[in-house]
Amino acid sequence: MTPSSWWLFLRFAQREVSNRFAGSLLGSLWALVHPLALLLIYSFVFTTVLRVRPVAETSVPFLVFLAVALWPWLAFQEAVMRGTGAVVANGALVKKVPFAHEVVVHAAVAASFAVQLGGYVVVIAFMVFTGQPLHLAGLGLVLLCLLGLAALATGLALMLGALQVFVRDIEQGLAPVMGMLFYLCPILYPVAMVPEWMRGWMLLNPVAVLIEACREALIEGRAWPAASEGLALLACVAVLLAGRMVFHRLSPHFEEEL
Amino acid sequence: MTATVHPAGLEPPLISLREVGKVYPVHSSAASRIAALWAKLRGVPHAASEFRALDGISFDVRRGESTALVGVNGAGKSTLLKVIAGVAKASSGTVAIHGRVGALLELGAGFHPEYTGSENIALACALMGLSPARTREHQEAIVAFADIGAHIDQPVKHYSSGMVIRLGFAIATALTPDVLITDEVLSVGDESFQRKCIAWMENYLEQGGTLLLCSHSMYHVQKLCRQAIWIEAGRARLIGDAFEVTRQYLAWHDERTAQSRKLQPGAAAAGGGSIYQVRSMRLNDMHSEEPVLVPEGGTLVVSGSVYSPDDRIPQIAVGVVKLDGTPVAGCYSEMDGFTLHRQEPQLYTYTLTLPCLPLLPGAYVARSHAMDPEGMRMFDHVELRFDVAGVSRETGICKLEHAWS
């Protein structure tokens, strides 16, 4: 991005965040309410109703086990979905004002991550404060994984957002796909519970690899990325580059289709 | 303004278009949509049903050479402005822009209805690439120029269209662009703001600014622009001097609209009407159909009456052109501060005396244009031919006082 696009990006990102809470009484507290509700309902279903025993190696309560993985997922999911809709949502602007169109996608992704990670920080701080055995030494790796997820979300949002201008079905199809992806990632369960023959396949999903890494970093204190995470990060960058390419191919034609 | 100083004449044109075309896809089915998308992803041209909005347009706009686009609705003027402003990409040909372009393409373009005027100023400045610090520098001037009072802190959705255009114009002009592109937006504001805009534009033009505007007001075109381009069905039908292009365009337009009333000079049209119009016109008080003969250095008196539908005092413009249409001179009652005389309800008269006519022998046409009381819009015109007789062997159009030594 050029410096002038950078100011525009900040302005849009700020607008995205403030838009979400404008006019609501609880304001930014809502950013915490939704994930906390999810956390409680999953926890109720899995520990009270289904009585799933956490596998031996996880020494923490299920709530903590779920919390460290849930926020990164929510950030990723929200970023992809909002980023994909960003160009069409800003159609009036695209048709009337010359500017670098990718800015709206970047702003949507950045705002989603900012809001969810704000909640993540609060929740981690709360858990540490209440004496949960989290390893803050792993925060560096968590940050690296989050950067990877942000890159992946940006790449997907650029690609899908550009296609969405031409084929409006993309957004409709995205919700069920994200719903399935949630269950295909080790968020509600550890990778160790997945049958042996499927684990190899799971490694092909960078979201699964990076979310599991976040959990291992915070719960087991692992500070350095493993080879599989390195590959996942490379895949994220590759998707980002591919997304940019598709976006730049299509963005000159947005005005014709919107 | 750009920092580099080019020697006169060497500066590249601010805007340079070569064979510019623009097509819009027309999708008939989902399959054609997918096929078009696939072609764009591969970067190859896609032969599908399409609407050709612009076709083979080439022209230059140099600094100080303000240009107007004229043409009927749907001719492609707005698309052309969009291509130049960088909102739409040309499908073929090249568009080269040197300098900062300020564009005011549509009423409230780029405004978010839920945000206040101030917030929209900030957003618009960011869209123009300004940092927050530079935005603050300009904010005050924009608010002052828009002059919409306390509304500046209310959501734009509650604005009247006049207030929206005030804010839009104030923002588009805040940075004093090298080229200001406007698309028929001046007609929206109220009289005082229109005057403010015109005054701003005249000042801007004096200081070397360049306008690219699209207007249906031939008066604005002639007053503000040097060059005009007549766009017809996506092609440039005529490019040249603003007076010449508007003259030909109007002639074509009159012919095209069969229902347009062709006023005969001297004959008062029957019935009322909703526009200001010239009801009668005479030269040197002659009633003949033959061209009036004026001796070299003689006096020409143009007189006539103007109908005013709302009985407000209309304005009048009188111009002299050569028989081939070359403009010679034009004057406006509004600029000269002349008030027309009320002869009877809704009918106003004027007499313009041109003494010591410095025109060289030849055939000329005098025209009277009816204008609204604000002097903003020109309505119809009536013209009469006159001949200047004489034996002068000087060349050109007019005689200049001169002395040899």
Image (spheres, rainbow, N blue to C red):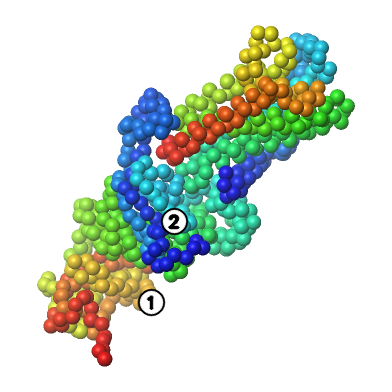
Tell me the SS state at disc 2.
loop
Q: Amino acid at mark 2?
A: His
> Residue B180 at x, y = what percent?
44, 58
Q: Residues within 10 Å of mark 1 (few under 14, many from 20)?
A: few
Q: What residue does disc 1 label?
A: B337
Q: Residue at x 13, y 73 (%)?
A: B291
**Location of mark 2 (residue):** B98
Q: Residue at x 84, y 17 (%)?
A: A59
Q: Residue at x 36, y 38 (%)?
A: B24
- Badge 2 crowding class, 10 Å Cα cut-off, few under 14, some 14 to 19, many 20 or more, is some
Quote the CA–CA distance across marks 2 and 1. Answer: 40 Å
Give the percent coordinates (x, y) of residue A71: 71, 28
Check the image and name the residue furthest to the front. Answer: A227
**Comparing marks 2 and 1, which lies closer to the viewer?**
2
Residue placed most toward the observer, B37 or B360: B37
Q: Position of residue A103 (x, y in %)?
A: 56, 41
Q: Is residue B72 above or below residue B275?
A: above
Instruction: Give the amino acid type for the residue marked by disc 1 in the picture.
Output: Gly
Q: Residue furthest right?
A: A131
Between residues B286 and B321, which one lies in front from this camera angle? B321
Q: Which one is in front, B74 or B348?
A: B74
Q: Chain of mark 1?
A: B
Query: Visible in this render: residue A128?
Result: yes
In the rendered structure, find residue B73 and report the number of the disc placed on it: none
Instruction: State if disc 1 and disc 2 touch (CB < 8 Å).
Output: no
Disc on the earlier residue, 2 or 1: 2
Inspect this view and state whether residue B260 appears: no
Q: Position of residue B133 (x, y in %)?
A: 64, 56
